[in-house]
Image (tube, rainbow, N blue to C red):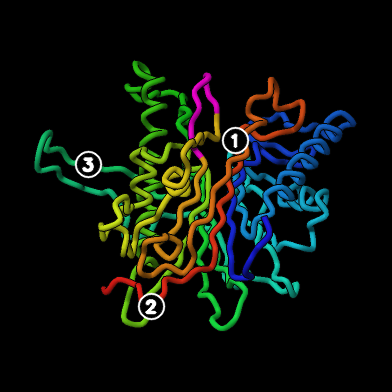
């Protein structure tokens, strides 16, 4: 979709399904693409498909998940003929079982980068986000200790400077995330096994996965609280979170991360005028806009789920008195999820999500008073 104003912004999230170069490892000792003629042909098919999707998305900012090799992502942009159109922030996975997230930011119309210095990965939870010696005062009244202190997949944080002058849009903070999946956690069964693994291994693996995802969502929320706040010096703080959050919009983990801002559904309501720390989901914005809406990005055991999300701060919410961009539309590209085999076309097992926002600051004469 063509931009009507150079300040307009579009965001996308794209799970790459274990993108790795031939001979490279992901979760096991068996490369997904062996370094032989057959493996290289399968790799070429995959990067060609990914490149075609990147070109289809045509988004200003794209967050990626499940990347194992920076070169593989560069190859996809190369196959799409877009290697000179985007700045790519990506790195190789540090080892087996440790996929990375990445980011691509389209260069401005003058060819200059919109990506500001300082992009990097955050591996550890905030120092003050520790669950040590918590004491419940109701119910079981137990002491709680959870020693998870790191993200299973480090979060990528970056800042972009959108184009345009008179006025120049403010910088926008971008976070790319890939929270722990609902799949069973990989636990050590080496002897001596903990008692719980001896008797309830499957339950324990599932419980640990959910606990980790909740902890990661809470840690991200703590990170965002530190930057999403209005002060006398800084009145606005545009933030966008892109990623595979591995749960639905109304799940506990996603709502914890989003901080559950209020949406306006009645014209006379003042809901949504201000939410310094809340994140609005692209899915919900589209649902309020569409008469018919089907949103799913993953299929597991014939169950359609919405795992991939675009979350935006109040500067992108139509009814906020701090609005700078207004929501135009959200699209989900998921036709490839219905194919019999992803291997046949090199597709991802996740749908792609793209959202558009038009530069449309709230006019001062109609902005509600604080």
Question: Neighbour class for label 2 at 10 Å: few (<14), some, many (≥20)?
Answer: few
Q: Which residues are magenta?
A: 299-307
Closer to the N terminus: mark 2 or mark 1? 1
Q: Is residue 360 left or right of residue 114?
A: left
Instruction: Name the residue at 48% across, 31% down.
Output: 305
Q: Secondary structure at mark 1?
A: loop
Residue assigned mark 3: 144
Residue assigned mark 2: 364
Q: Is residue 309 above or below residue 313?
A: above
Tally the numbered discs. 3
Q: Image quarter for residue 233?
A: bottom left
**Nearest to the observer: residue 87 or residue 124:** 87
**Between marks 1 and 3 in the image, the one whose residue lies nearer the viewer:** 1
Name the image quarter holding the C terminus. Answer: bottom left
Q: Is residue 134 left or right of residue 45?
A: left
Across and down, in percent, residue 217 comes to 39, 47
Residue 119 appears in the rendering: yes
In space, the residues marked 3 and 2 are separated at their CA atoms by 49 Å
Q: Is residue 298 left or right of residue 280?
A: right
- Assess whether mark 1 and mark 2 are in contact (beta carbons under 8 angstroms): no
Residue assigned mark 1: 350
**Between marks 2 and 1 in the image, the one whose residue lies nearer the viewer:** 2
Residue most toward the right? 37
């Amino acid at each position: 979709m063509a931009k009507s104003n150079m300040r307009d912004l579009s965001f996308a999230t794209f799970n790459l399904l274990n993108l790795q170069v031939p001979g490279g490892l992901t979760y096991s000792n068996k490369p997904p693409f062996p370094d032989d003629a057959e493996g290289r042909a399968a790799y070429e098919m995959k990067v060609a498909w990914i490149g075609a999707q990147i070109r289809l998305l045509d988004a200003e900012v794209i967050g990626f998940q499940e990347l194992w090799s920076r070169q593989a992502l560069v190859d996809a942009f190369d196959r799409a003929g877009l290697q000179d159109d985007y700045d790519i922030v990506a790195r190789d996975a540090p080892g087996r079982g440790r996929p990375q997230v990445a980011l691509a930011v389209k260069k401005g119309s003058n060819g200059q980068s919109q990506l500001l210095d300082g992009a990097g990965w955050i591996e550890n939870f905030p120092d003050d986000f520790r669950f040590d010696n918590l004491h419940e005062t109701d119910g079981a009244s137990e002491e709680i200790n959870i020693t998870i202190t790191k993200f299973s997949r480090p979060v990528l944080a970056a800042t972009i400077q959108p184009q345009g002058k008179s006025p120049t849009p403010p910088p926008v903070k971008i976070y790319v995330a890939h929270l722990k999946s609902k799949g069973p956690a990989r636990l050590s069964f080496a002897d001596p096994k903990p008692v719980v693994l001896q008797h309830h291994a499957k339950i324990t693996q599932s419980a640990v996965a959910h606990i980790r995802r909740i902890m990661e969502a809470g840690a991200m929320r703590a990170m965002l609280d530190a930057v999403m706040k209005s002060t006398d010096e800084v009145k606005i703080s545009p933030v966008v979170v892109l990623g595979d959050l591995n749960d639905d919009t109304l799940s506990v983990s996603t709502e914890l991360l989003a901080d559950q801002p209020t949406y306006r559904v009645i014209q006379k309501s003042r809901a949504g005028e201000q939410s310094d720390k809340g994140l609005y989901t692209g899915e919900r914005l589209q649902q309020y806009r569409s008469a018919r809406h089907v949103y799913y990005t993953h299929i597991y055991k014939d169950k359609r789920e919405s795992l991939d999300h675009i979350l935006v701060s109040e500067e992108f919410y139509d009814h906020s008195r701090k609005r700078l961009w207004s929501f135009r539309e959200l699209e989900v590209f998921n036709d490839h999820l219905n194919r019999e085999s992803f291997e046949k076309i090199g597709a991802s097992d996740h749908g792609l999500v793209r959202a558009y926002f038009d530069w449309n600051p709230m006019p001062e004469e109609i902005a509600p008073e604080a």
